[in-house]
Image (spheres, rainbow, N blue to C red):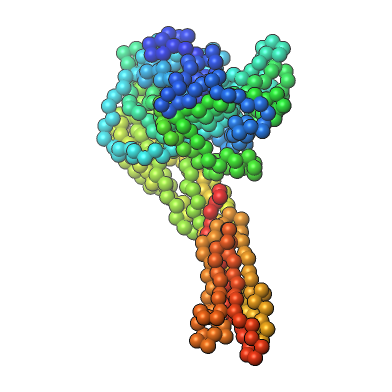
């Protein structure tokens, strides 16, 4: 996944603007400062720093790090810029030595390579602030890398003792702003199936709204070797560690504490919430997307797709939003099903999953599906002839309910020890109590209903049940109390 930010230069600025992958406009001197106002907190330099791993900020940063490896296989191109410095359609190029998907940097060019077009038909997007895209990662000197990437070349660059900036970052997008569709500008030249636009290799596309959370660390050249995960963890745990927190859009990530405590690497246990979404990023598309007869890759969100908790044998469903950026109608094929997607329009495509298994607790499952797009008119001169999007899906499943029961019987006698009827049960791991009940109650009550001199208790107690029977102790007459204790527990993953 490549994301980006700028090194200066806003709308109409020249080629001095640098965009890095995920480029975070957070570090001093690296990007324009983010205004502290609606949807944005003060910049990292204005916030109190923490020292050591004991503070709340450091603990949250460690939690982000524990979750980062779950997102290493997510790849997208974005310019991440909370200051809204870019104009959609503006050209960008890969900086010298840059390589897409390998932490390469971007550089803005003054040329507008694409012209925005209005949306045409298709299903309107829901106003609900559902998360379209969530990511947790590590960046070094404003270059995003996977948690398992070797940082030795990064931290060996520069003079001995030079300081490098290591960032832990979480981002979440909730929706796109218009424009979402583009045609080539007059600056684009066509040559067969290839196109050119000055020095640009890509152009700035749709505006992404959402939130961002980042932590900055310092690492010195030559002092750290190994993976991004190991280096960042070592710096956070160092006695002289100091980090600055930056938060934009009110992003909250649930499940981080569990990730830190258990080493959880499943993205399904993280839930992103954006309280006040603001423009924080732009999509980046290749110039070839506006070439004549181009068939650009449709935008599909959310990715990855979390089905949540679905018990074994039950059906889970999700919708993915498909935006067709091509000027021709498409057919989307998934698992033998076909769906029409209008030209420069959108639709919600249904996904279904009925997980199977026999795990005793929560069972984290993943699967991948290929969503294939092709022109509805087979004779249309589209280049390429088809596009494919890999859907990465996750679900947390298990047996939907667990029931425990036992026949409790004091036996008959004149001196009954009612303490022997006490039962204190707890639901198994990954389950929560759904009900406690006493069935088939019998006692020495003359009416046989156990409501006058006898009391049978069945109540919830914590994450379980407490059962007991109390009654008279007679010497002249025999007494007894009998019942079935029943505890119902339901599946709750990630609790």
Q: Position of residue 193 (x, y in %)?
A: 38, 21
Given residues 100 and 155, the one toward you in this image is 155
Q: Answer above or below: position of 451 versus 68.
A: below
Where residue 188 sits in the image (x, y, percent)? Answer: 35, 14
Viewer can see residue 421: yes
Q: Is residue 65 above or below residue 422?
A: above
Left or right of residue 451: residue 229: right
What's the residue at 67%, 31% (across, down)? 53
Query: Which of the pair 73/456 is nearer the observer?
Result: 456
| Residue 406 percent location from the top left of the image | 61, 73
Up/down of 333 relative to 482, above or below: above
Residue depicted at x 41% and y 39%: 130
Of residues 135 and 458, which is closer to you in this image? 458
Residue 85: x percent and y percent?
41, 17
Which residue is rendered at x = 50% and y = 51% of the image?
Answer: 309
Above or below residue 431? Residue 415 is below
Residue at the image position 45 percent from the left and 22 percent from the top: 36
Q: Is residue 139 visible?
A: no
């Amino acid at each position: 996944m490549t994301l980006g930010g700028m090194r200066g230069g806003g709308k109409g600025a020249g080629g001095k603007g640098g965009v890095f992958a995920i480029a975070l406009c957070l570090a001093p001197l690296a990007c324009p400062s983010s205004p502290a106002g609606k949807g944005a907190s003060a910049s990292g330099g204005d916030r109190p720093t923490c020292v050591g791993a004991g503070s709340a900020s450091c603990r949250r940063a460690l939690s982000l790090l524990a979750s980062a490896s779950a997102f290493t296989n997510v790849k997208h191109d974005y310019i991440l810029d909370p200051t809204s410095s870019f104009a959609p359609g503006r050209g960008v190029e890969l900086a010298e030595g840059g390589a897409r998907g390998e932490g390469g940097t971007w550089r803005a060019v003054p040329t507008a390579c694409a012209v925005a077009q209005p949306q045409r038909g298709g299903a309107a997007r829901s106003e609900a602030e559902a998360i379209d895209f969530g990511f947790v990662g590590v960046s070094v000197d404003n270059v995003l890398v996977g948690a398992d990437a070797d940082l030795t070349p990064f931290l060996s660059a520069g003079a001995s003792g030079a300081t490098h900036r290591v960032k832990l970052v979480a981002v979440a997008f909730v929706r796109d702003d218009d424009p979402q569709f583009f045609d080539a500008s007059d600056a684009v030249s066509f040559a067969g199936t290839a196109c050119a636009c000055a020095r640009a290799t890509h152009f700035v596309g749709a505006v992404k709204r959402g939130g961002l959370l980042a932590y900055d660390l310092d690492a010195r050249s030559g002092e750290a070797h190994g993976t991004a995960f190991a280096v960042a963890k070592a710096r956070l745990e160092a006695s002289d560690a100091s980090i600055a927190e930056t938060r934009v859009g009110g992003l909250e990530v649930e499940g981080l504490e569990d990730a830190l405590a258990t080493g959880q690497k499943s993205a399904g246990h993280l839930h992103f919430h954006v309280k006040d979404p603001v423009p924080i990023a732009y999509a980046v598309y290749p110039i070839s997307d506006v070439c004549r007869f181009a068939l650009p890759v449709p935008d599909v969100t959310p990715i990855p797709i979390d089905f949540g908790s679905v018990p074994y044998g039950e059906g889970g469903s999700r919708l993915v939003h498909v935006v067709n950026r091509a000027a021709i109608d498409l057919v989307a094929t998934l698992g033998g099903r076909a769906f029409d997607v209008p030209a420069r329009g959108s639709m919600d495509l249904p996904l279904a999953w009925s997980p199977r298994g026999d795990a005793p607790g929560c069972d984290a499952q993943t699967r991948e599906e290929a969503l294939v797009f092709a022109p509805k008119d087979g004779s249309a001169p589209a280049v390429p002839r088809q596009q494919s999007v890999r859907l990465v899906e996750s679900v947390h499943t298990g047996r939907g309910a667990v029931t425990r029961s036992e026949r409790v019987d004091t036996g008959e006698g004149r001196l009954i020890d009612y303490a022997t009827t006490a039962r204190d049960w707890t639901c198994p791991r990954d389950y929560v109590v759904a009900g406690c009940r006493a069935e088939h109650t019998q006692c020495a009550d003359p009416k046989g209903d156990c409501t006058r001199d006898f009391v049978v208790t069945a109540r919830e107690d914590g994450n379980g049940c407490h059962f007991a029977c109390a009654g008279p102790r007679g010497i002249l007459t025999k007494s007894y109390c009998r019942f079935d204790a029943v505890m119902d527990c339901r599946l709750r993953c990630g609790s």
